[in-house]
Amino acid sequence: MAIGKNKRLTKGGKKGGKKKVADPFSKKDWYDIKAPANFETRNIGRTLVTRTTGTKIASDALKGRVFEASLGDLVKHDDEDSYRKFKFICEDVQGRHCLTNFHGMNITTDRLRMLVKKWQTLIEAQADIRTSDGYLLRVFCIGFTQKMRGQIRKTSYAQHTQIKAIRKKMVEIMTRDIAGSELKEVVNKLIPNSIGSEIEKVCRGIYPLQNVMVRKVKVLKKPKFDVARLMEMHGESYSSVTIDDKGQRVERADGYEPPVQSSV
């Protein structure tokens, strides 16, 4: 075969060669995740996002991201409650900080499996409750019967009428504690499990209970986004974040035109 006839045999191979593989992390930035002021530990982690390029804005990619953190990490000296997990959703970005809001609560699967045992009755209740600031929450409560004082019998099963009465009390207490409160106050009640303790105390006359707690909280609906309310949850005022400094007025003559620049 004559040299020059086959284009593939030309010296140097294909024009341009292989493309350089760029490191994808070189186009990304790290952002700090800030939890609301209800928790002692505010910085709960960092998240990665592609830098703003063209019409793709980094803050838009961050808004709506959901983060999960254990209560043991959020509150110092609270390792006993590390089985409870709180969810946060990014609602606004200020500088390199993602400002989050409460998005739900749950308990770990292993803790739930540990609580379920034989020879006792499991009682569950749920209610859809609207807070005073417009959030619709679905709250799930769980509790277990325990032996009465001086009981010899192995089992501690509650009767159907007792279960119904306990379930009714659970819904009543959850509705009373959450319906008249703002979301910030609801989170403050969920951290020490005060709702579960109150249910346990009230239902003692019907049947003694143990391990009563709010098992899960889901945010079904939320009001229109308000920056001032989010800043309040983070313990800051909206005016301290926004820039109010006004520029100085420059006097110019009528028909003034800026000078033409020789180079840009």
Image: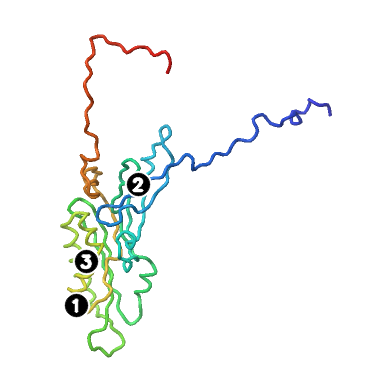
Q: Is residue 234 above or below residue 75?
A: above
Q: Position of residue 5 (x, y in %)?
A: 79, 26
In this picture, residue 175 sits left or right of residue 14: left
Q: Which residue is at 27% across, 57% downward?
A: 40
Q: Is residue 252 above or below residue 237?
A: above
Q: Secondary structure at mark 3?
A: helix
Q: Secondary structure at mark 1?
A: helix
Position of the C terminus, as image quadrant, is top left
Q: Which residue is mark 1?
A: 204
Tell me whether circle 2 and circle 1 mark residues in contact (CB < 8 Å): no
Q: Secondary structure at mark 2?
A: loop
Which comes sooner in the sequence, label 3 or label 1?
A: 3
Q: Which residue is at 30% across, 49% downward?
A: 100
What residue occupies the far top of the structure in this picture?
Answer: 255
Q: Position of residue 136 (x, y in %)?
A: 24, 54
Q: Which residue is mark 3?
A: 195
Dot 1 amino acid type: Arg
Dot 2 amino acid type: Gly
- Marks 2/1: CA distance? 42 Å
Q: Which residue is at 81% across, 26% downward?
A: 3
Q: How dense is the environment of label 3, judged by Cα within 10 Å: few (below 14), some, or many (20 and up)?
A: many
Q: Position of residue 135 (x, y in %)?
A: 23, 52
